[in-house]
Image (cartoon, rainbow, N blue to C red):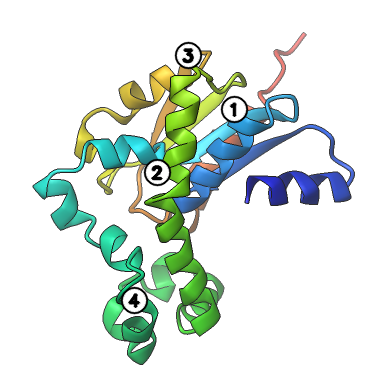
């Protein structure tokens, strides 16, 4: 996926760019910045940690709260068949009033698409396998993200299930982490778009002081 990001940006004519990712997308953003340091100018992770940090801290609390990691990651008993039989029973999202009518409709169209469900499951399977291997290799080689990094953490989510997420991120970064809490549930961009936009603009395009 990180290679796809690089190829897409090159196709669009951008040889250097910032990357922003939310949740599973934060893993892609992190991998893009780690593997392509000469191309990524800034990294923003929204409600995400390196996957190995979750897996090495797994305990009963994490397994109970984040049970979907293990459910979606199964291969012997594929989750797709269960989910696609009744998607409405498996997913719970904010309503259209909170997310926006268009956002809500797009999300639920995707959640009912068997191809999308399969892709989601494959992503979690990778998270329990090759993604962890990549993180282990980076840590063993003492590689770090070298660009400025911002963590956006939802106030009403549980990214802090392992403790302070900013402290967990620090060893992975060559520069101090910027950290901002967004007053929202897990769906930051949909539930608090103005706050997210301001945080991104402050980080990616800070205003120049008046002369």
Comparing marks 2 and 4, which lies closer to the viewer?
Answer: 4
How far apart are the two marked residues, 2 and 3, measured between alpha carbons? 18 Å
Secondary element type, mark 4: helix
Label 4 vs label 1: CA separation?
A: 39 Å
Name the residue: 51% across, 29% down: 150
Residue assigned mark 3: 176
Q: Farthest residue in the bottom direction?
A: 85
Viewer-side residue, 209 vs 17? 17
Left-right relation of 2 to 196: right
Q: In this orientation, which residue lies closer to the viewer: 62 or 181? A: 62
Where is mark 1, residue-wise? Answer: 203
Closest to the observer, 191 or 47 = 47
Query: Helix, strand, or loop for circle 1?
Result: helix
Observer-side mark, 4 or 1, equals 4
Q: Which sits earlier in the primary sequence, circle 2 or circle 4?
A: 2
Rate crowding at label 3 as few (under 14), some (14 to 19) or many (20 or more) other CA atoms within 10 Å. some
Q: State if disc 4 and disc 3 touch (CB < 8 Å).
A: no
The residue at which mark 4 appears reads as: 79
Vertical position of residue 119 compared to residue 163: above or below: below
Task: Report helix, strand or loop for mark 3.
Answer: loop
């Amino acid at each position: 996926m990180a290679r796809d990001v690089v190829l897409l940006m090159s196709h669009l004519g951008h040889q250097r760019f910032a990357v922003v990712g939310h949740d599973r997308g934060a893993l892609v953003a992190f991998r893009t910045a780690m593997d392509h340091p000469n191309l990524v100018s800034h990294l923003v992770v929204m409600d995400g940690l390196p996957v190995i940090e979750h897996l090495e801290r797994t305990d009963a609390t994490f397994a109970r709260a984040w049970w979907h990691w293990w459910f979606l990651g199964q291969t012997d008993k594929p989750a797709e068949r269960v989910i696609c039989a009744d998607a409405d029973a498996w997913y719970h999202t904010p309503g259209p009033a909170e997310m926006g009518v268009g956002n809500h409709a797009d999300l639920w169209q995707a959640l009912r698409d068997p191809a999308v469900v399969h892709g989601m499951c494959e992503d979690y399977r990778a998270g329990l396998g090759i993604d962890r291997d990549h993180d282990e290799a980076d840590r063993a080689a003492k590689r770090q993200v070298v660009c400025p990094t911002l963590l956006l953490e939802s106030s009403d989510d549980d990214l802090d299930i392992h403790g302070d997420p900013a402290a967990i991120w620090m060893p992975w970064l060559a520069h101090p982490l910027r950290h901002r809490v967004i007053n929202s549930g897990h769906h930051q961009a949909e539930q608090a778009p103005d706050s997210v936009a301001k945080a991104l603009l402050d980080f990616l395009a800070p205003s120049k002081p008046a002369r």
